[in-house]
Amino acid sequence: MQESPYLEGNGFLMEKLQHLPFLGSVSEKYIKDILRFSKIRKFDDGEIITKEKSYDNWVYILFSGAVKIEKNGKEIARLDEIGNTFGELAAIDGKMRSASVEAIGPTVCLAIDTSFMNETAEPLEQALFVSVLYKLFAEVMAQRLRSTNDELIRVRSELETLKGDKG
């Protein structure tokens, strides 16, 4: 992995970040706050970005490339769209990673260090910043839950069809 220093003061990323679905609704002020706690990370093909059952505080936004997500050694998803995010569950509940994430080809991510979420100057500013991040995380999780529900319905329907064929 190659890693930049923290991106505080790197305004060149502002426009790019404002066009990402994950951050598109966030004001410039909060994007600047997010950048203070972020780094650019570059991964090679096959490199593990996060390891299942490990602990860390990083949330990732895909800038280029793709990743596969594996749980118990089985692929459960692929993310290949700019702006896709991963790692938010561990940031929210502080528990170990629920899945491993591996780079597919050269991959570049914005990595947000959420351990710094509580280090803004004033308590009110801290609460506002954290609430903005958590709202973004909730939107990502809601989208994933909807997709999972659709897949569950499809699999249950297929299972019923298979049961009917045997009966």
Image: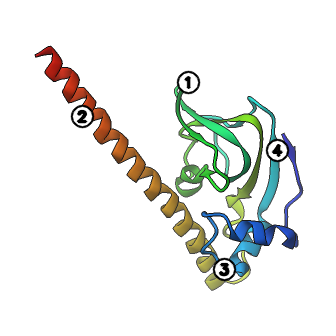
Secondary structure under badge 4?
A: strand
Image quadrant where residue 160 sits: top left
Distance from the alpha carbon under mark 4 to that under mark 2: 41 Å
Distance from the alpha carbon under mark 2 to that under mark 1: 26 Å
Of the two numbered discs 2 and 1 on the same chain, state the one appearing first in sequence: 1
Nearest to the observer: residue 6 or residue 84:
84
Identify the residue shown where x is 63% and y is 75%: 26
Q: Is residue 111 above or below residue 73?
A: below
Q: Is residue 111 above or below residue 159?
A: below
Q: Which tag is nearer the camera, tag 4 or tag 2?
A: 2
Of the two numbered discs 4 and 1 on the same chain, state the one appearing first in sequence: 4
Identify the residue shown where x is 72% and y is 73%: 31
Q: Which mark is drawn over residue 157?
A: 2
Q: Is residue 109 left or right of residue 25?
A: right
Secondary structure under badge 2?
A: helix
| Residue wearing tag 3 | 27
Distance from the alpha carbon under mark 2 to that under mark 3: 43 Å
Q: Which tag is nearer the camera, tag 2 or tag 3?
A: 2
